[in-house]
Image (cartoon, helix red, strand yellow):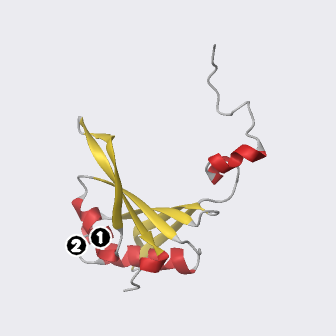
Amino acid sequence: MRFEVSDTELVKITTDELKHFSETRFLNLLRKIVLNFFENDQPVGFVSFDVRWINRNAYITYYLVPEKRGKGLGKAMVLEAVRFAFDTLNMNRITAEVYDYNDASIALLRSIGFELEGVMRKAKYHTGRYHDIHIYGLLRENFGRE
């Protein structure tokens, strides 16, 4: 058997088989939603969502510029974004993947109500060694609305 490298699949998935695949395989909807946050008209951070519309699940990523950290702004940004995801985007669940060495991010997620759901062992290569990726989840029904 031989193979060719390509950016598209030549075999089409049948309609019956679609149930076994992520919606990203057959829907061409906007998936990335970004909330940019500002202080005094200057961007200080963002929260982005990679949305799975049919499953009503969004994967969250967030960043705050280093000089603004430690003041509660990161938590405020993520809380506002989570409210937006549940209330405006009608998500049922938000998923976060965090590297095991990112203690600040893990503490932030836990403080909002995210729960550790699993670990992908040695899935991140950084500084010459492998690290675990922790999977956190937050369901709409468990969000405290602080």
Report which residue position mark 2 lands on: 70
Report which residue position mark 1 lands on: 110
Q: Is residue 33 above or below residue 127?
A: below
Q: Residue at x 61, y 23 (%)?
A: 5
Element type at mark 2: loop
Instruction: Give coordinates of residue 23: x percent, y percent.
Output: 64, 53
Q: Residue at x 22, y 60 (%)?
A: 103
Q: Quadrant of the C terminus?
A: bottom left
Is residue 107 among what the camera can see? yes
Is residue 64 among what the camera can see? no
* Residue type (three-letter) at the residue carrying disc 1: Arg
Element type at mark 1: helix
Q: Residue at x 63, y 47 (%)?
A: 20
Task: Using the image as rendered, state which of residue 7 and residue 37 is in the foreground.
Answer: 7
Q: CA distance from mark 1 to mark 2?
A: 16 Å
User: Left or right of 40: which side holds 29?
Assistant: right
User: Left or right of 65: which side holds 94?
Assistant: right
In the image, which is nearer the foreground, mark 1 or mark 2?
Answer: 1
